[in-house]
Image (spheres, rainbow, N blue to C red):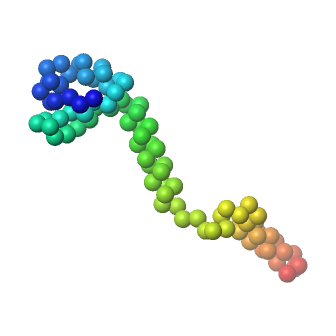
Amino acid sequence: MVVPLSVLKENPAKYFYLAKTNDIIITKRGKRLGRIVNEETAMTSNKRRAIEELIGSAVFPPEYNDPNHDPDYKLLRESSFKDRGLL
């Protein structure tokens, strides 16, 4: 819903009530000034954006998708064999 600032000033409570279900975009002379959003929606979208940024910044080696590849297990196994004198 797009609302001019002058209309918002006349009855702000009405638009804060409407923001429970819809985003309210505030304009002045046809240009966007801001937005009133539901608190739960804002928190959810911020959390989602943060998680997507973290996942997008992670670099996985090609063998990550191989279920048989576990580098930690292989290193532990080799060190265990060396400790027992088997290698």
Which residue lies at the image location 67% right of the left edge and 68% below the top edge?
63
Relative to 49, residue 39 above or below = above
Relative to 5, residue 60 above or below = below
Which residue lies at the image location 87% right of the left edge and 75% below the top edge?
84
- Residue 63 can be seen, yes or no: yes
The total of numbered circles placed on residues is 0
Q: Give the x, y percent position of residue 5.
A: 15, 30
Q: Which of the two residues, 30 or 24, is positioned nearer the viewer here?
A: 30
Relative to 52, residue 82 above or below = below
Res. 73 image quadrant: bottom right
Name the quadrant of the N terminus.
top left
Q: Which of the two residues, 5 or 78, is positioned nearer the viewer here?
A: 5
Which residue lies at the image location 73% right of the left edge and 66% below the top edge?
69
Instruction: State left or right for residue 55 relative to residue 18.
Output: right
Q: Give the x, y percent position of residue 46.
A: 41, 42
Instruction: State left or right for residue 16 relative to residue 84.
Output: left
Q: Give the x, y percent position of residue 76.
A: 76, 69
Q: Give the x, y percent position of residue 60.
A: 58, 65
Q: Which of the two residues, 81 or 19, is positioned nearer the viewer here?
A: 19
